[in-house]
Amino acid sequence: MDHTVSLTRHVNASPEKVWAVITDIPASADTLSGVNRIEMLSDGPYGEGTRWKETRTMMGRSETVEMWVSQADPPRSTTVKALQGKADYTSRMTLTERDGGTDLTMTFGAEMVDPSRATKIAMALFGKLGLLATRKALAKDLAEIAAKAESL
């Protein structure tokens, strides 16, 4: 991954409760304040191949991206992928039981597919700003996931 951010938060809930929150895609717009809307594209329980469209506001812009589960190992880890333009996004959540709760680690990466010279220059100039905004959004998501899991 060209640009990666990873954060960990301890959640005072079991891995099963945290897993239930992070895999309830239809309810994620209620759980995560940065998510405006979810449109499910597949039926059935959460697992490899589950697809949806997520509309999220970030840095003042609202964008809709189609996402899918590329890996699921309940209740230990899951990986979600998305492609948007020339960006290949990977989000990985890892759950580790610790001290009667769960360490939830979120790792987000963006890789440019065949970037143009202008894209490379823009990433060199603004990439750190984007990573800071991503870190802030991930921290907020982690706090909101923790609050929901701890209330179950």
Image (cartoon, helix red, strand yellow):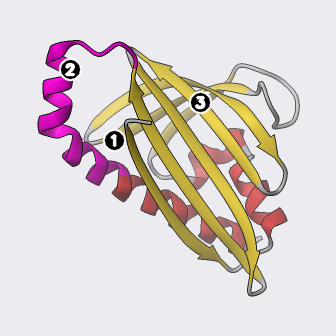
Q: Which residue is mark 1?
A: 58
Numbered circle sitting on residue 81 = 3
For the image, the number of numbered tags is 3
Amino acid at pointer 3 = Lys
| Crowd class of label 1 (few under 14; some 14 to 19; many from 20; radius 10 Å) | some
From the image, state whether disc 3 or disc 2 is nearer to you: 2
Where is residue 95? Give x, y as percent.
71, 62
Q: Which residue is mark 2?
A: 119
Q: Tell which of 7 and 19 is nearer to you.
A: 7
| Crowd class of label 3 (few under 14; some 14 to 19; many from 20; radius 10 Å) | some
User: What is the spatial separation of the Cα atoms under label 3 and label 1, in whole angstroms?
Assistant: 18 Å
What's drawn in magenta, residue-wise?
Answer: 113-134
**Side of 10 where 87 appears, left or right:** left
The dominant secondary structure in magenta is helix
Amino acid at pointer 1 = Met
Under circle 2, the secondary element is helix
Tell me the quarter of the picture where residue 127 sits: top left
Q: Is residue 56 above or below residue 75?
A: above
